[in-house]
Image (spheres, rainbow, N blue to C red):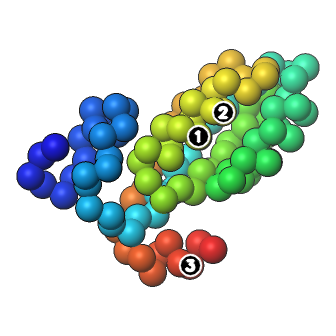
Amino acid sequence: MHSTDHLSRREILTGRLADHPAIAEAHVSGLVVHVRPERAAGARAALECMPGVEIHAEAAGKLIVTLETDSDAEIVTSLNAISLLDGVMSAALVFHHFEADAGFAARRE
């Protein structure tokens, strides 16, 4: 681990988070999810059941989705889970906002 308070991409992807001090975080990510049109209803239903996921628009097999999480690791986990949903051809992270403020996280609930 490094001596700074920032996690590296490698630490996130390899799961080396245990020794890192807990920091109250809130992450808001924007995704574009491209689904097969014939499977769009099933993919939409599965997305609606995922915690922190909200669908804002849908057209021509593309869904505009926001994802609210408490850590970078949760973004990666959720993005992978979305990518593996039946009918999903791709899920792309197109926006990410981070707040290191416990007050922001409490306002989301």
Q: Which mark is residue 27?
A: none
Name the disc covering residue 82, or none.
2
**Secondary structure of the residue carrying numbered label 3:** helix
Disc 3: which residue: 107
Q: Which amino acid does label 2 sit on?
A: Ile
Relative horizontal placement of residue 67, taking residue 75 as reference (left or right): right
Going from the N terminus, do you reach mark 1 or mark 3 first? Answer: 1
Residues at marks 2 and 3, CA–CA distance in whole angstroms: 25 Å
Image quadrant holding the C terminus, namely bottom right
Residue receiving disc 1: 78
Classify residue 47 as left or right of residue 83.
right
Residue projecting furthest to the left: 3
Give x and y (percent) for residue 97: 43, 56
| Front: mark 1 or 3 | 1
Residue 62: x %, y % from top left: 73, 31
> Based on the displayed image, in which of its 4 quarters is residue 81 positioned?
top right
Q: Where is residue 12 in the image (x, y as percent from the top left)?
A: 34, 39
